[in-house]
Each structure stands twice: as structure tokens, then as C-alpha cells.
Image (spheres, rainbow, N blue to C red):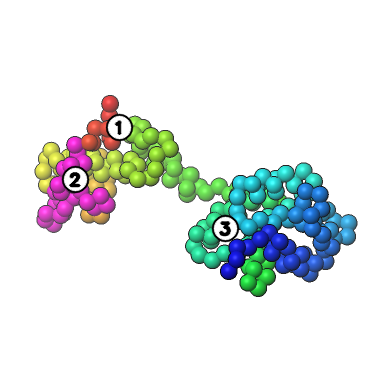
């Protein structure tokens, strides 16, 4: 199957708009598609074969001549496209743009968002989680911009506190570890063993694995000390 062209998008987009009572013409000035319905303001659609920064720039430029501006791209299959569609729909909403996909196999046109003012919804849960992580984090152990791999979180710092205690005191009861380190969920963290640092040696008693002992060697920087 040959690669889609922008011109392949025009017939289904034109038919979609005409079904809603619009008169549609292509290549009017800088606009790929322009539609008028009675005395209503014009609708502009920019056609592209895929998402790109250029597409967003073009649509933003069209807002100088029309309030209702849509971007249209071919609908594709696969998780990668669905992720791109979700992300670009969110970006389009934030910029006050509309987004349309066209399934070229049968001409199905889907409107994923319409142009309009954007009012982001705040998540109290996510905001609270972010603030709690900031408050619990000791020092500033990460380099800004680094990848998620190896990122030092407050959870990792707490796990290292447990590892350091076990390294020095030997296998201990979870309640004792929690009391001495100040890490309240110590027993649960050692039981979950997210990093492979802990091992259960008896009922309620945990010790350190060789991997955990190795982690302790670099605990100084990871715990935020100088």
C-alpha cells in the first residue's frame, strides 16, 4: 500500500463537512480547506500525513484568520499511533485547536476535539503526591534532565536507610527497623523487596542480600549527604 498523501484526506473531510451543511473549498489562500455555513465564522482544516511541529505551527498561524481551526491526519493502527493521538489531542486542546483523523480505508472521519478555550483540570491527588515526594526527598541527589533509570526517589532513599541499618545491625525485626530508622512502613518495604535488597530470615525478621550490601556502599550520595 502506497504512503498516504494530503490530497487523499480532502474528499472524506469535504464530504464530512458538507454533510453538516457547509460549503467547502480547498486551497483558499494559505488554508488547505475552508468551509462556510451561512453567516457563521469560517472553519479551516489543515491536512497533513502525520503529526508534526510544523502542523501545529500552521494551525496556530491560521488562528489569525479564523477561530475554528482543525488539523486532520490519517488514522493509523497500533499502540504507537494511539499514544501519539492521545498526546496530540491533549496538546491541540491546550492550544485551542481541533483534531480530526481520517481512516483512509473507508473514509471514516472522527473528531477527537473541537477548537475552544482550554481550562486545564487540576488533580489534587497528583499535586499532593508531587508535594509529598518533594518533602520526603533528602537533598538533591539527581541531575536535572536525567532519564528515569537510576532516578533517586524518596522511596529509594527510605529503602537505603533500611539497608544501612541492616548492614550495621544485622538481621532484625521489622518493628525494630521501623523504630530505629524512622521509616514507618519498613516491614512492608522489606517484604515487597522492590530492589532485591532484603530477604526474610524468620517470621517478621529481615536481613540484607548481597545486592543490598552493595547498595549500601554508595548510600552516602543517594541519601543526600555531603
Disc 1 secondary structure class: loop
Residue 199 shows in the view? yes
Left or right placement of residue 201 versus residue 68 in this view: left
* Distance of label 3 from label 2 (alpha carbons): 42 Å
Foreground mark, 3 or 2, reads 3
Q: Residue beneath label 2, please?
A: 212
Please tell me which of labels 1 and 3 falls first in the chain.
3
At x 19%, y 36%, the residue is 217
Disc 3 secondary structure class: helix
* Distance of label 1 from label 3 (alpha carbons): 40 Å
Q: Residue beneath label 1, please?
A: 224
In magenta, the rendered stretch is 193-217
Q: Nearer the viewer, residue 121 or 150?
A: 150
| CB atoms of marks 1 and 3 within 8 Å | no
Foreground mark, 1 or 3, reads 3
**Residue 96 percent across, percent down from the top left:** 68, 49
Question: Is residue 206 covered in magenta?
Answer: yes
**Residue 196 percent across, percent down from the top left:** 22, 51
**Residue 146 percent across, percent down from the top left:** 40, 39
| CB atoms of marks 2 and 1 within 8 Å | no
At x 49%, y 62%, the residue is 79
Please tell me which of labels 3 and 2 falls first in the chain.
3
Disc 2 secondary structure class: helix
At x 66%, y 61%, the residue is 5
Q: Residue beneath label 3, please?
A: 85
Q: Quadrant of the C terminus?
A: top left
Dividing the picture into quarters, in which one does residue 22 lie? bottom right
**Residue 43 percent across, percent down from the top left:** 78, 55
Left or right placement of residue 119 versus residue 188 in this view: right
* Distance of label 2 from label 1 (alpha carbons): 18 Å
Residue 100 shows in the view? no
Circle 3 Cα neighbour tier, 10 Å, few/some/many (<14 / 14–19 / ≥20): many
Amino acid at each position: 500500500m502506497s504512503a498516504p498523501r494530503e490530497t487523499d484526506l480532502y474528499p472524506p473531510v469535504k464530504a464530512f463537512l458538507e454533510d453538516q451543511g457547509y460549503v467547502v473549498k480547498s486551497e483558499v489562500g494559505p488554508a488547505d480547506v475552508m468551509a462556510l455555513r451561512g453567516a457563521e465564522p469560517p472553519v479551516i482544516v489543515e491536512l497533513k500525513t502525520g503529526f508534526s511541529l510544523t502542523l501545529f505551527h500552521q494551525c496556530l498561524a491560521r488562528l489569525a484568520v479564523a477561530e475554528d481551526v482543525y488539523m486532520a491526519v490519517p488514522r493509523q493502527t497500533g499502540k504507537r499511533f494511539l499514544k501519539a493521538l492521545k498526546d496530540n489531542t491533549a496538546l491541540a486542546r491546550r492550544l485551542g485547536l481541533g483534531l480530526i483523523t481520517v481512516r483512509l480505508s473507508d473514509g471514516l472521519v472522527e473528531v477527537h476535539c473541537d477548537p475552544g478555550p482550554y481550562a486545564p483540570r487540576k488533580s489534587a491527588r497528583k499535586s499532593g503526591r508531587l508535594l509529598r515526594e518533594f518533602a520526603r526527598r533528602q537533598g538533591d541527589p539527581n541531575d536535572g534532565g536525567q532519564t528515569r533509570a537510576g532516578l533517586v526517589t524518596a522511596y529509594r532513599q527510605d529503602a537505603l536507610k533500611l539497608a544501612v541499618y541492616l548492614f550495621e545491625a544485622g538481621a532484625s525485626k521489622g518493628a525494630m527497623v521501623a523504630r530505629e530508622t524512622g521509616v514507618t512502613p519498613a516491614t512492608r518495604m522489606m517484604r515487597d523487596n522492590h530492589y532485591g535488597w532484603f530477604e526474610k530470615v524468620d517470621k517478621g525478621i529481615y536481613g540484607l542480600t548481597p545486592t543490598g550490601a552493595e547498595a549500601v556502599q554508595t548510600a552516602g550520595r543517594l541519601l543526600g549527604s555531603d
